[in-house]
Image (cartoon, grey):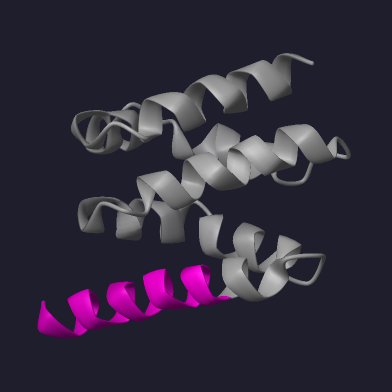
Amino acid sequence: ECQYYGAFALALLAKNKSFQVPLAKMGGVRPLVSIMASKHSDARHWAALALLKLADNFNNHITIAEEGGISALLAIGNGEGGVTVANLAKRAFDDVKQKWRKS
């Protein structure tokens, strides 16, 4: 139940573009990735939404990739509604690869 409320709160905060980078910098990605492995589908839902919202900001792509967020999103991508999640995760991964190539 705590995971549900924590992921829910982070998803709501991550909708605000001005909070996206600070949330990632303050360590918000790692707990979301952990929740993605939870047996509670509602908690996973909110964690996935929060990760996707954080991924709206290009500055968070590296952090999400390093913390295992892409793999976590792809893992749920094998379930119902996975095509959309998998495509979004792939797009984020492609953006990360492009950024690394530029540096």
16 up-or-down from 100: above or below: above
Name of the residue lying farthest toward the left = 103
Q: Which quadrant of the view contains residue 24?
A: top left
Disc tally is 0
Magenta extent: 87-103
Left or right, 103 with respect to 53, comes to left
**Quadrant showing the C terminus:** bottom left
- Asked if residue 91 is positioned above or below residue 42 in the image, the reply reads below
Q: Position of residue 25 (x, y in %)?
A: 29, 34
Image position of 37 with respect to 88: above or below: above
> Where residue 3 sits in the image (x, y, percent)?
71, 23
- The quadrant of the picture occupied by the N terminus is top right
Q: Position of residue 93 (x, y in %)?
A: 41, 74
The residue at 48%/69% (across/down) is 88
Q: Is residue 43 covered in magenta?
A: no
Q: Is residue 1 left or right of residue 46?
A: right
The residue lying furthest to the right in this view is 39
- The verdict on residue 90 being magenta is yes
Residue shown at the point (49%, 32%) measured from the top left: 11
User: In the picture shown, does residue 27 fall above or below 62?
Assistant: above
What residue do we see at 18% from left, 31% from top?
18
Instruction: Please name the predominant secondary structure of the magenta segment in the image.
Output: helix
Residue 50, percent across and down?
50, 40
Taking the image as shown, residue 72 lies to the left or right of residue 24, namely right
Report the residue at 81% width, 65% height from top. Answer: 80
